[in-house]
Structures are given as C-alpha cells and as structure tokens.
Amino acid sequence: MDNLQLLRYEVILHWIAVSIYVISTIFFAYSVSFKKTSPLNTGVMAAMIGLIPHAIAIAIRWNVSGHGPYMSKYEVLTSHSWVAIVMFLLIVWKIPKLRAAGVVILPLSFLMMTIGLFTNPDISLLGPTLSGVWLVIHVIFNKLSAGGIIIALASSVLYLLKNKNEQKEFYQKLPSLEVLDAYSYKFIGFAFIFWTITVVAGSIWANQAWGRYWGWDPIETWSIITWLLFGLYLHLRHFFKWKGIKAAWLLIACFLSAIMSLYFIPFIIDTLHSSYFV
Amino acid sequence: MAFILKINKFLISPKTIISLIILTLAACLIGFLVPQITDKSPSFFETWQENNIYTYRFVTRLQLHQVYTSYWFLGLVCLIAISLLSSLYAQIKKNLNYRLKCGTQNTEYRTLNTDKIRTALHKKRYREQGFINEGNKLIFTKNSISRWGSVIFHAGLLLVVISAILVLCFQNRGFVQLIEGDTFVGKESGFIVKSRGALAGEYNTVFYTFLSKLDHTYWETGKLKHLESSLTIVEDKEQTDKKVSINNPLFIKGTNIYQSDDYGYTLSFVLKKLTGEKVVSHFNIDRASNVRKHAIGKSDYPMSPYIVEMKFLPDLEKKSFYLNKPIVYLNIAEGLNNVFSGLVIPGDAVKIKDDILHFTGVRYWSGLIFVKNPGMSIAYIGFVIVIIGLVIMFLLPYKEIHLSFDPVQEVYNITGKTKKYEAIFNEELDEIRGEIEKKIES
C-alpha cells in the first residue's frame, strides 16, 4: 500500500474517531443536562472505543512521516486530544466518580481534532534542529501537561456546576465539593510538574540548538506567563487558603493562558516555534 | 539587626511573594505586548518616534522596549533571588526544628494489641514513628520527605535565577562567518555580531578555528536537513579535528561553538587597477530561501568607487544549493552610473572602465556562534533540582495517621492530617478505617 493510500485511511480513521467522540460527548452532555448517571458509563465506553481508530490514525501518520506527531497543527492537535482522553480514562479507572468530567474533556478533544483536520494535513519534514532526546522529552511532557490542564479544568468545571446544583441527586453522586476542589489542586500540581519539565527540556534543547536557553521568544514568554500563573495559583492556595469558587476561576484563567501558549501563539504569531507548526 | 530582621520578614511574607510573582507576570506581559529592540529593526523605532513621540518617550524612559535587559527587571530578578534565599533559610530552619516528639506507650495500654492495625498501615507504606500524647497515641507517617520538597524546589529555582543573573552579567557571545579554508583567530574584533554581559570583559578564544568543509543536505522539498562544519581547532601548536552541527555543539576550553543555520556563499574577486594595484575582496552572501531563487548580495568594493550588486545561483544546471555550476549576475555602479552588467562565472574577468575585475572563485561560508556562558552548568543543576522538588511536593504529600485508644468505650480512634489534598486524604482515611475495622473483626 502506498503512502498516499495510507494517509487517506488515516484521515478516514480520524473522522471515525471524531464521530465516536461526538457520540461520547452526547452521552456525557445528556447525563449532566438531565442529571442521569447511567449514560456516563456509555460515554466512557464510547471514548474508549474512539481511542482505537484515533491511535491507529496517529500510528499510520507516524509511520509515513517518519517522526512523532509534533510537526504541524494537525499532528499537535490530534495527539494532544488523544493524550487528554487517555489521561481521562486512566483517571476514571482510578476514580470512577470523576466520570462526569468527560462533559468537558470529550468536547474539547473532538473540537481540537476537528480544528486539526481542517488545517493543512501535509507532512512536514524535520529541520536540522528537530532532533535529540531533549526534543522528545519536550514534546512528550508538553502533551502530558496539556492533558493534565484539561483534566484540572474539568474538575473545576464540575466543582462550579456542583456548587450551583448541590441538592440535585445527580450532583450528589459526584465527589464532594471539597474533594473536587482537592482534585483540581492535585491535577494542576501534575500539570505544573509536566509544564516545568516541558519548559526545562525546551530550554536545554534551545541551548543545544541555538546557544541560548532563553530568548524571550513569544512562545517562551507565554509559557513562562502560564508557569507563573500556575505558581500564583499554588501560592494563593498555600498562603491564603484559596479554595472553592475563587480557586476554580483562577484555574480557568491558568487554562486559558495555557491554551494561549499551546495553540494560539505558535499558530498566529511569527515565532521560532511557528516554523514547526505549518 | 532589627532592621535586617524586619526586611527579612518583609521578603518572606506571603504578600511580598505574591506581589513578586504578579510583578514578574506583568513584566512578561509588557515584554510580549510592547515591541522589543531584540525583535524589531532600528527603523521601526525611528518610525515610532516620528509618529508618536510621547508614547515612545514613555516607553524608552521606562525601558519598556527592552524589558529583559532593563535595570528595573534586573532589580526585580535580584529581589526575587533575595526573597528566595530568605524563604529558603526560613524553611530550612523550620524543617530542622521540626520533630515528632515520640515516646513510649502508656503502661495503661500496653496490653492492647495493635499488631493488626500496624500491619495494615505498614502495607500502605506508613511508617511507625512512636507514641505521643503521654504515650496513648501512636503516630504513623508517610512521605516525610515532603517537608523538604518546597526547600528543594526553591533552591533549584534560586540556582536558575542566579544563573540568569550570571548570564546577564558575564556572558560573551559572538557570531562569525567563517569561509571554507579560512581561520578565525578568536579575537573579539573578528565577530560580525557580538554581545557582552554587563560585567563581561573582552572575549577572545584561546584557540584558532579553521573551517575545512561545510556539509549541507536537503529534503526533496529543498528544506535544510543537516548542516555540519568540519573544523580544525588549533591551540598551542596542537591541532584537533572536530565537527559541529546544528543541535550538536562543541565545547572547547570554556567556549561553546554552535552551528548556526546561517550559511551561504563567498564570492571572491580581484580588482586589477590601471595602476597595477590589486584589490582582493570576498563577498559573503546568504543562501537563498528557496532553491529556485538566487542569492542576493550588495556591497561596496573596497578601495574603489564601485558598488557591486550580485545575484548568484550556485547550480545553474541542477538548480540545487550545491556549488556545481555557479554563476553570478553582476551589476556594478559608480555613484549613480551603471558601469557593468552581465553574467560571470568563476575564472572570468571583465573590464570595468579602465580596471579589470577577476571572479576568482566561490566557496561556502558557515555561521558559527561562539559562546562563553559561566552560568549554564548552574542552570542545568537548578533545572534538575527544581523538578525533583516539584515531584516531592506534589506527588508525595506528607500524611500523618494518629491511632488512639479510648479505654472507656474500648474503641480505636483513627485520625490523620496532611498538608495537601486534605479532602482526598480524608477519603483515604475512611478507607483505612474500614479496612482496619474489618481486620479487627476478623
């Protein structure tokens, strides 16, 4: 089978995965909107099924391009959504009460994939700077931090929803408000570690490639802004015992800042990173 | 002394720490929003000054157009470093003074059998510390190292900040266009672009660098795939052959040599004047962005009235970036008058008024960056420590379980405390209670 044919299959598989994630989203949305718990399991199941064509599609592209999924908007968005869903399923496996978080994670994921599918799907070739172990670490932890932030956002959204509808039966089946708040804190802790490793690995890689580990490129600036916002969140929780609604809204601000550095800045502003996201 | 203590108290107060984070955030946002001198050309700022003098004055006086090299930003970084240092001292002191004052079990309860509970907690990786509260409360702890997580993280951060300050003060950096077959003698005056830290002295490498070959390969699309310079390092009559490529720098005698992705062609000419005087000149021109485009260069010809404009193709036949069949279109002007236009290949000689211009050959030049950075190893150590600290802080939260016995009701009480994720820990505690109850019943 030639590469062109394989890439055709890859796009088809991506669309199949998107469709399944849409179905999963419908179940989650139905469950949260109509306060029913049974569709949550179906939503989780659908997400698990969707991962299969999604993973195959990524693997096909990896095989054809000869590099990991990090060289175009298309590859970045699809791999980020795959990692986010895998992380969500792992968390649901450990903490089944957090299934309802799928109402945030699944739509965000299929949205990212769909945006990716409408961008240029051409395979980008690796420039000479794109090699080495630090690039691999940078890319892997970038994806993990994106997943961690999305899951932390989902916990905060669930917190805000439960805070408004605490008396309703559906929300009583979710973890308590205190536990949801603690999960947001825990997940942002994970994301903070991953984000730090991303920044550190990126710095070491930049030093190897360009002879400087920090150059205040717009992406670098936004990644440090996001890191500082995380730091602010964690310090406010630690020193001023910020909890609940205030902490949830600050976490949403952290999420928006992370979105800026992960997607908007490299895609809309001409930076050193732009050349990698064709 | 009282004043120093007051300052110290101020520096580690939560409000100061939060303010410093917010100020750094604001500085970064300014650096992102206001055009910076490192990103824009001087003409951009000239136009800005012409169009909006008041905003320009405001921005330049506050150094908002050079945030990261401004005095106030350096001050902020120093303040952060001092605050980190004070905070570290306070945390270390607190941690060293922290002791669980455990003793022996109260004789009244000695007959009680806590073995099953102990085994259950040991299985969950809780370590028995001993008895407190006059010997009637047994303490178990988990992740005791967590108390040091914050210290480790902030120590790492301090090292990174110190390294940043060292870079700002002592880093030397220079860019050189080295032609194949030529030697860079390592003098600062030889750099075509250089930057020096605020307190750094003159930068001279202690070795010579000779470029023997530049290798470059491309993808089918013409995109650069690999770029590598073969160098000979000459030091004290000793010669060593080395290779430097993008992403694989060289480290020699305190200097890092990086392969830049800038490279191109050196066109060499000899101008033979009517008087018999010969003027040799080499023009370095950048490689074209696209294989179908020609490389462009324009320069004054030294010791002559001529301005030379070049449009160069390295490979007329195969349209590649390699020097297979080079050709240059020369446009030579004297003042406003054009004195020569035409295609020239290596070996050709053309007549320009009364002079003869001989196109002697073409070679590659390679962009090499020489960096002396005393702070880099400190930054690397800092990075590792930061990550270790974070992992300890967020993945290994400190947990304490207190097991006490109520002799009146003859029941065990299990309570606990943690410094992070309290609500999740309470759920874990409920599980532990359930498991222990089951064990006791069995």
Image (spheres, coloured by chain):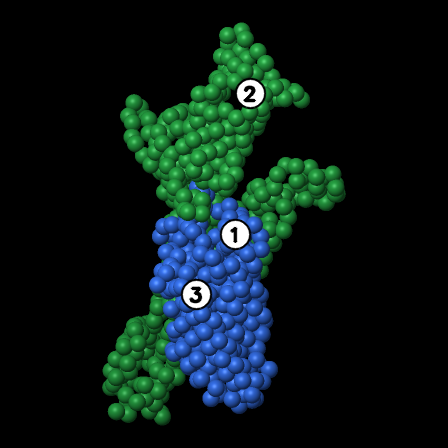
Same subunit: marks 1 and 2: no
Give whichever of B268, A203 is nearer the camera.
B268
Q: Tell me which corner region of the image, top left, top right, bottom left or bottom right, holds residue B49.
A: top right
- Which numbered mark, 2 or 3, is in the foreground of this view? 3
Residue B122 visible in the shown view = yes
Mark 2, Cα crowd under 10 Å, few <14 / some 14-19 / many 20+, is some
Same subunit: marks 1 and 3: yes
Residue B234, placed above or below residue A205: above
Q: Please tell me whether mark 3 sits on a helix, a strand or a loop.
A: helix
**Which amino acid lies under the numbered mark 2 shown in the image of this protein?**
Tyr
Q: Tell me which corner region of the image, top left, top right, bottom left or bottom right, holds residue B256.
A: top left
**Which amino acid lies under the numbered mark 1 shown in the image of this protein?**
Ser
Q: Tell me which corner region of the image, top left, top right, bottom left or bottom right, holds residue B11.
A: bottom right
Color used for chain B? green
Q: Is residue A173 left or right of residue B436?
A: right
Mark sitting on residue B191:
none
Of pointers 1 and 3, the one earlier in the residue sequence? 3
Residue B199 visible in the shown view = no
Q: Is residue A177 left or right of residue B145?
A: right
Q: Which residue is mark 2?
A: B301
Mark sitting on residue A8:
3
Subunit ID for the residue under disc 2: B
Provide residue B277's location: percent of width, then percent of height.
51, 9
Give whichever of B404, A268 is nearer the camera.
A268
Give whichever of B409, B238 is nearer the camera.
B238
Provide residue B325's location: percent of width, then percent of height.
43, 31
Which chain is painted in blue? A
- Residue at x 44% of width, y 50% of height: A203
Determine the CA span between mark 1 and mark 3.
26 Å
Give whichever of B165, B28 is nearer the camera.
B28
**Which amino acid lies under the numbered mark 3 shown in the image of this protein?**
Arg
Mark sitting on residue A274:
1
